[in-house]
Image (cartoon, rainbow, N blue to C red):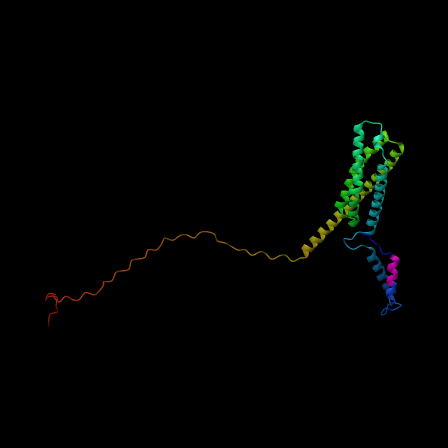
Amino acid sequence: MKFKLISFSRITIIVLWAATLPGHSSSPANPAAAQSSAQATIASAAEPPQGAVSYASVTELNGLLGQLESTSSTAQVDLAKLRIERWKTDGATKKQSLADVDSIERNLHDALPGMIDALHGSPEDLPATFKLYRNLDALYDVMGGVVESTGAFGTKDDFQALTNDLNGFEGARKQLAERLEKLAGAKEQEIIRLRVELKTAQSAAPPPAPPKKVVVDDTEPEKKPPVKKKPAAKKPAHATAPDSTQTPQAQQKPQ
């Protein structure tokens, strides 16, 4: 990903050219206002929008990564020239040095380019920056052992070449550490700003309506004793006819 910066002179030319278009007076009625408007346009174009990566940050990163890529290419050539098998030392030292050189070459050829490409795509990505820093830190430690062994058992030219490579990796590591510190500080300031904006928005927003209370009566009602129904009176199947054999005393006396 490449980042381009529009120069101030180009923006000024665009503003002046726009003033000559139809509908614009060749001699504005208020020159001071026109100058102020042009300056505001230039300033807004020079400043990156919120959340964008600044030109200075990209320039700094490109210089760092360019130096790192150059050091990596030179180191791979210098490591390939080593003749560890000719060193006048024991077999265990030779075996360890060969393993370290193989590990460094695989890192420089396989792992490091991917980390550099990731930062080219996201210049201010903190996790990607820290990942590259950790890789350089481990690479420096392993290569330092190889340089030390080369100085003890290898040729003077090999030792000097690898020392220069090691210094190049150390310089890139220090620059990356400083960049990490600056990025972390900028992210912290951004978090503080977002918190302030959030509090301001929350205080300006109307308070939420109080929630409605729903009362649920979960007490069991008292059980009333069941009402016993009175049995209905039984009616006779048929009315009894008056007995004709009533005694004369029960019959009505004639007047």
Looking at the picture, tell me which residue is in the foreground, 201 or 68: 68
Q: x, y percentage for residue 131? A: 76, 43
Please, which residue is most extreme toward the front here? 85
Q: Residue at the location (87% across, 34% down)?
A: 158
Please, which residue is most extreme toward the bottom here? 255
Looking at the picture, does residue 110 appear above or below residue 88?
below
Q: x, y percentage for residue 211? A: 58, 56
Going by the image, does 230 lie left or right of 214?
Answer: left
In magenta stretch: residue 9? yes
Quarter of the view holding residue 71: top right
Looking at the picture, tell me which residue is in the foreground, 190 or 154: 154
Q: Which residues are magenta?
A: 8-15
Q: x, y percentage for residue 132? A: 78, 43
Principal secondary structure, stretch drawn in magenta: helix
Going by the image, does 32 lie left or right of 195?
Answer: right
In magenta stretch: residue 143? no
Q: x, y percentage for residue 243? A: 14, 66
